[in-house]
Amino acid sequence: MEDFKVKDTNLASQGRLKIEWAEAHMPVLREIRRIFEKEKPLENCVVGACLHVTKETAVLMRTLKAGGATIALCASNPLSTQDDVAAALAEEGIHVFAWRGENTDEYYENIEKVISYEPDITLDDGADLTVILHKKWERIAEKVIGGCEETTTGVIRIRALARDGILKYPVIAVNDAETKWDFDNVYGTGQSTIDGILRATNILLAGKKFVVAGYGHCGKGLAMRARGMGAHVIVTEVDPIKALKAVMDGYEVMPMKEAAKVGDIFVTVTGNKSVIRKEHMLLMKDGAILANAGHFNVEIDLKDLEEISVRKRRINPYVDEYTLKNGKRLYLLTEGRLVNLAAAEGHPSEVMDMSFSNQALSVRYLVEHGKEMKPDVYKVPLEIDRMVAELKLKCLGIEIDKLTPEQEEYLRSWEEGTI
């Protein structure tokens, strides 16, 4: 087996500086690393990870390694790898198979290289590793103790595996931890998506009509940040409850076919496919910008876009101009892939501190309890979620109140009512 495969090992020194910067802003994960270094809870454990290979992921990999794990890592998106970080991890003994700009074949070959290490624990972001294991490597999947899934899209896919009776090992939905999705999804996606759009285009958001497709946690954060930049935000939804929340939060809500006529910038963040289709594209203004912040590059229908176009040209590394048959021009950012990771650096380290702390502690939990758990999708144990929150507050220098014994008894009882 290859030890690693990255773009350029000479980039390692630059990558180490990036990782050091992230570590300085991830105090909770540093504290967990100190615990892991002392206790070695992952001794003799092989972790197979399919994650965005960024400086924040590197801090997680260092933490797992400090706990005694052997790690094989590949990218969960062909355009999200930071090549200098990958080189630094390879130098530190992580079996990393990732580089920015992988083609589809290379992407899946790298996943299979990770699988070849026969992991005891899987870490996934989007469920490609989990699905390939179940499709092609049943023998190895049956030996896996447990897994973790980082993102909404992946949790949906793994729940489908469980529903169909295919899932072979327990998976903790790290995405659903309150210290993950109430922070990473809202504050991380909101800020990093705006960052990616601005790095790609340098356009002014103030005064623009900014269409957010999907009002889950990620969409909520994105809408909030776009409004903060002065944009007029329009939300499209298929879920009546989420649509009503958007209305109550002060946004204009309408179907995509109506939003297409007025929007200047469109960002999909739904976890579904073909959210923006040719019937929408043909209605758009000349110069409209299309971007995706959902995990896979299927939310903007690229086949439809190609079909209705007569010319395509690359404006810069992140922007492709499509001239439609009706003469209008649409601008697609980062080939429809995650704009916050392809054109920027992904979520800020401070929010990934909580997400990856949940990952690290969930890995330890699976090593200790995974063999007792049935194949299914599980929530992050509440004690882990609360520990992450408590550590984060401590690192921020913030104290909170504690219940008195009398208050604890009151919450346990049913006898006291109106006085």
Image (spheres, rainbow, N blue to C red):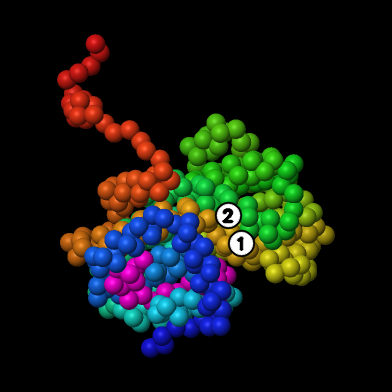
Task: Look at 19% across and 29% down and name the residue there.
Answer: 405
The mark nearer the N terminus, 1 or 2, is 2
Give the x, y percent position of residue 411.
23, 28
Left or right placement of residue 44 versus residue 279 in this view: left
Residue at 28% over, 47% down: 382
Secondary structure, mark 1, is loop
Q: Mark 1 near mark 2, Cβ–Cβ under 8 Å?
A: yes
Q: From this viewpoint, is residue 339 visible?
A: no
Q: Examine the rendering and report whether any part of residue 208 can be seen.
A: yes
Mark 1–mark 2 Cα distance, whole angstroms, equals 7 Å
Say left or right for 323 vs 306: right
Magenta includes 71?
yes
Q: Is residue 275 left or right of residue 331?
A: left
On the image, numbered disc 2 is attached to which residue? 192
Which of these two is toward me, 312 or 173? 173
The x, y position of residue 139, in whole percent, is 27, 78
Tell me where the magenta segment starts and ends, as one range.
63-85
Quadrant of the drawing holding the C terminus: top left
Give the residue at x 78% y 63%.
323
- In front: 95, or 59? 59
Tell me the kind of residue under disc 1.
Ala
Estimate the x, y position of residue 417 in percent, counting from the top left.
23, 16
**Which residue carries the number 1 mark?**
344
Kind of residue at badge 2: Ser
Name the outermost residue toward the front: 397
Q: Going by the picture, which residue comes out furthest to the right? A: 327
Q: Quadrant of the N terminus?
A: bottom left
